[in-house]
Amino acid sequence: MRGGALGRLLHVDLGSRTARVEEPSDALYRNFLGGRGLAGALLRPHLSCPWDDPDLPLVILTGPLAGTMAPASGRAIIASKSPLTSTFLDSAAGGSLAASVKRAGFDGIVIRGAADGLVGLRLEDGNAVFEDARHLAGSTIGETYIAVLGENPAEHPAFAAVGSAGEQGAAFASIGVDRHHMAGRGGLGAVMGAKNLKWLTVRGTGTVPVADEEALLKAREAILRLTAASPVLRGQFGFSNYGTAALFDLTHSRRMTPTDNFRRTWFDRGEGLSAPALKKRYASHSAGCEGCPVECLQIAATPLDGETDWALPEFESLSHFTALVGNHDPDEAARANRRCVALGLDPVSAAVTLATRREIAGRDFAPGEMVVLLDDIVTGRGEGELLRLGAYRCAEAMGQPEAAMTVKGLELPAYDPRGAYGLALGSAVATRGGCHLRANTISHEILRKPVATDRFSFAGKARMVKLAEDAIAAADCLGVCTYMFLTAGLEEYAAALAAVSGEPWGQGELLRVGERIVYQERCMLLEASCGPEQDDLPERFFIEPGSETETQPMPAIDREAFLEARSAYYAVRGLDENGKPMPDRAAALGLECSISTPPV
């Protein structure tokens, strides 16, 4: 049994410019399926390497549903060791990369070594061709796309590249995918840049085998019906019409928009920063990943600085480049986001780092200053020498580490934890660091799906976070977009997996895989000396209230209640009282936990 996988990984050595095929054991696939789980299993033996060590792999993994008709199943997981968190980190990328890798005959690509100069890599089905890319040094991701594929290529192979941020080793450099997608978080662009891999294209002409086409069609129809009925995804004010900027309106209405570097939770944004206003301002239309029924990207037709066909900022970037940094101009936010995309910088980490600098410096940004600072981050010029290290290291060097809004070194996204206590707990214990998507409790606490819950209470949140983490981990193994779980569930996707693989899969089996993956990541955290003291939020959230009104309180989080909820989470997750994995529990999940827990 290997859960719909092809059973082939392509290993690329950039140092020797060679490639070989590995056929992993069925047991590896049975335990980890693909995507995030398989990435962790492949990387775990190598995480003692520094992030820029040539021996450290950078992996691109697909899920078993990639390249099939299962809706929104084309997320590629790119993973390695993060320069920000110093442990395992994965980032999901949309576009066509996962489907192309699968159609080329592989479940994933494992990239090792470092070239002696910038190179590009073309994968055509089973053939790997290396090309000199030194002439593209310093090129933006968009410029690299055109240089490699042309302005309007007749055929569209999947494309991934780093910008100058990755080449120069900025700690939160990203990897651009196709024209408008990104593996954004954690600095994976710096890892790719350290290998001197400038770009990668993948073209596959094969088909993905499906055991039961009729059953897959039935599962697909069930998922599409649920998607069509979802107000969040396909409703009048949902993602299909306005993109993820619709969430900016939602957090605004709940008074949980991170403002002024998380010192407030309400931003007086005026009328120009709502999702409908932005769509009208830029005359945007919808676009999306391969096989997606939602199409949550918004592509502008209105020129900005002479450029058209550019992607509007998604929710996280929009919120952080406005409210978080005190900016009311949507054009300034769009310019900052576009510059991040061009240079290959994570917009979330970039904005939080700039907000940290703004708080410590005690002054607002002048018009155009954010874009200048983003360029400085890449080159290391002036203030960029500190800013390129990320919010925590920057604030620490400036003598105010309390100003860094990070967890485990990763900058927090655009939801204020004071506005949803499951979010607060989930963000603190997230194995990736400052990330809401590991549990995505926003669906329960804000969207009230599948069941409503009191967002200002920790009651029941430990179990909710644990189960949500398991479900999301399973989805990340399947390669399914997290947004689909605002409407469909593991039951529907288990039916799709059973149809593709010809094996019996149900929701319970997928949750078991998800539980194994989260526990594996807890083991990797311990092996990286990332202890439970880092399962915490910045002190600000426990001592400063949010922006309250008489009818909508937003108090500081009660520290004792948070710690009780965290202890409860440790218990339901099967960790010891200090949040450390236990060998017996690891063994029950088919894992090894080699570091013993010392006595307290």
Image (spheres, grey):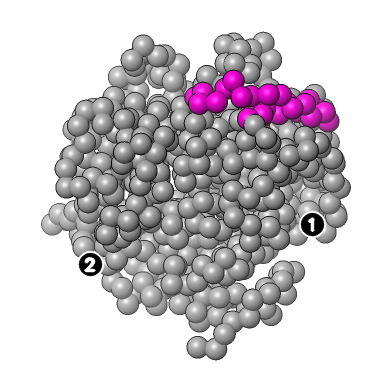
For this rendering, which residue is in front, 56 or 474? 56
User: Measured along the vertical axis of the image, is residue 397 above or below residue 122?
Assistant: below
State left or right for residue 442 relative to residue 176: left
Q: Residue at x 35, y 23 (%)?
A: 279
User: Measured along the vertical axis of the image, is residue 202 above or below residue 574?
Assistant: above
Q: Is residue 373 magenta?
A: no
For this rendering, which residue is in front, 212 or 147? 147
N-term mark: 2 or 1: 1
Dot 2: within a 10 Å radius of its alpha carbon, few (fewer than 14), some, or many (20 or more) residues?
few
CA–CA distance in space, label 2 to label 1: 46 Å
Q: Amino acid at mark 1?
A: Leu
Mark identifier at residue 543:
2
What span is in magenta? 118-140
Mark identifier at residue 28:
1
State left or right for residue 127 relative to residue 546: right
Which element carries disc 1, helix, strand or loop?
helix
